[in-house]
Image (cartoon, rainbow, N blue to C red):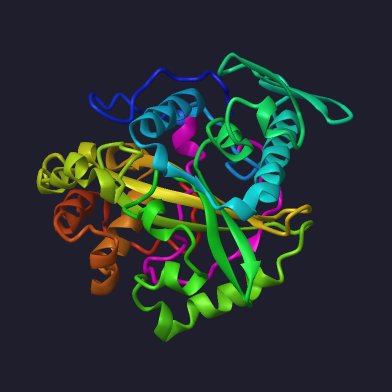
């Protein structure tokens, strides 16, 4: 994908838009006409050229704007980045992991040079150059987790493994879909996922935890999750609900194509070598219904998924108020014909 970084906003005037190339590579998550919560974990192996999974961490045309939006959120609420004291080794793991991944996969944009523990990091899109001593926090302008968390698209949670479970003991979270880092930090796996409907009955979280507890460093994994957002707003946190919650009342059958956005999370998990922590990356991709409908097969598929979604999931995903308006808008693309399986567009 072209890395011509766009000047755009995810709040106020909402100038965010996807280029045709960005729409084409959008991680559409529905291979079938029905959806139910599932583990759906697969190896995080390199995807096709241009896909969001081509590299370890995806950098796209929204990189600079997303980093700017993240900085705004952190300035307004520094508590969106939190790390418990015992997570310092995991913070350095994260810094090394992100710097090495970006420099290896995007050498025109990022570089990392090492002379023993004396490292120099260059981030050309953001105009940053930083020399520091690896392991010495005093040589960075802030903690290593926050320093690099600000320079990577998406949210990150560092999971500590102990007591036969995983604990969310650090996080930098500025584009979450209606959950709170301040509430979740320090929680165990089952406490964190307790509100997700149907999962206890289906045993989804038990199976996922068992799988992740045995995650190996050389074998990262990924899955897709989704919800919806009104307007292309990254920060839909409970703390800022007054800023975005009312937008859900504005959706009609006439304006749903412009206002309603499918919000897909590419969730990837990596085992770290030094701390044994797991980096949980939650990369958010947004697409409006109008943009989705440039590929009518996607619009047809999503119409069926949304129309027939289990009531518990409708409520959990917070789309009750506008589900029917979006279904009505999408129905114009659905002739009822069989479109087979698979997530590919036309």
Examine the rendering and report whether any part of residue 19 can be seen.
no
Front-lying residue, 259 or 73: 73
Identify the residue shown where x is 23% and y is 26%.
12
In the image, residue 52 sits, relative to residue 75, either above or below, namely below
Residue 253 drawn at (x, y percent): 12, 47
Front-lying residue, 288 or 57: 57
In the image, residue 179 sits, relative to residue 35, either above or below, namely above
Residue 328 drawn at (x, y percent): 16, 54
Residue 93 falls in image quadrant: top right
Residue 40 drawn at (x, y percent): 54, 67
Q: Please say whether residue 98 is one of the residues in the magenta stretch.
A: no
Residue 291 falls in image quadrant: top left
Examine the rendering and report whether any part of residue 138 can be seen.
yes
Identify the residue shown where x is 42% and y is 43%.
80
Identify the residue shown where x is 46% and y is 51%.
265
The N terminus lies in quadrant: top right
Residue furthest to the bottom: 201
Q: Position of 185 compared to 217: left or right?
A: left
Q: Main secondary structure of the magenta part?
A: loop
Q: Position of 336 compared to 4: left or right?
A: left
Residue 182 drawn at (x, y percent): 39, 52
Region of the chain picked out in magenta, as a range: 21-50
Identify the residue shown where x is 38% and y is 29%.
75
Residue furthest to the top: 127
Q: Position of 88 compared to 242: left or right?
A: right
């Amino acid at each position: 994908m072209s890395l011509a970084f766009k000047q755009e906003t995810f709040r106020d005037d909402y100038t965010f838009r996807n280029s045709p190339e960005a729409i084409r590579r959008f991680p559409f998550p529905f291979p079938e006409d029905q959806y139910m919560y599932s583990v759906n974990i697969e190896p995080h192996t390199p995807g096709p050229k241009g896909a969001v999974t081509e590299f370890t961490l995806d950098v796209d045309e929204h990189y600079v704007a997303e980093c700017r939006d993240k900085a705004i959120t952190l300035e307004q609420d520094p508590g969106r980045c939190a790390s418990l004291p015992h997570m310092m080794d995991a913070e350095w793991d994260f810094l090394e992991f992100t710097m090495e991944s970006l420099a290896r996969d995007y050498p025109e944009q990022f570089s990392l040079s090492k002379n023993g523990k004396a490292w120099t990091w260059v981030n050309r899109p953001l105009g940053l150059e930083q020399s520091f001593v690896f392991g010495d926090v005093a040589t960075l302008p802030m903690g290593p987790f926050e320093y690099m968390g600000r320079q990577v698209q998406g949210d990150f949670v560092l999971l500590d493994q102990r007591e036969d479970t995983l604990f969310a003991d650090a996080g930098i979270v500025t584009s979450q879909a209606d959950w709170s880092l301040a509430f979740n930090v320090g929680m165990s796996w089952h406490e964190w996922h307790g509100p997700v409907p149907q999962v206890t009955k289906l045993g989804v979280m038990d199976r996922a935890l068992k799988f992740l507890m045995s995650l190996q460093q050389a074998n990262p994994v990924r899955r897709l999750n989704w919800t919806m957002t009104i307007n292309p707003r990254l920060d839909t946190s409970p703390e800022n609900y007054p800023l975005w919650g009312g937008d859900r009342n504005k959706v009609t059958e006439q304006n749903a194509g412009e206002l309603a956005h499918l919000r897909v999370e590419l969730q990837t998990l990596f085992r770290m070598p030094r701390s044994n922590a797991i980096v949980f990356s939650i990369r958010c991709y947004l697409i409006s219904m109008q943009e989705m409908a440039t590929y009518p097969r996607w619009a047809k598929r999503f119409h069926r998924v949304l129309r027939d979604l289990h009531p518990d999931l409708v409520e959990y995903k917070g789309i009750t108020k506008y589900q029917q308006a979006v279904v009505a808008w999408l129905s114009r693309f659905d002739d009822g014909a069989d479109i087979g399986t698979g997530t590919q567009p036309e």
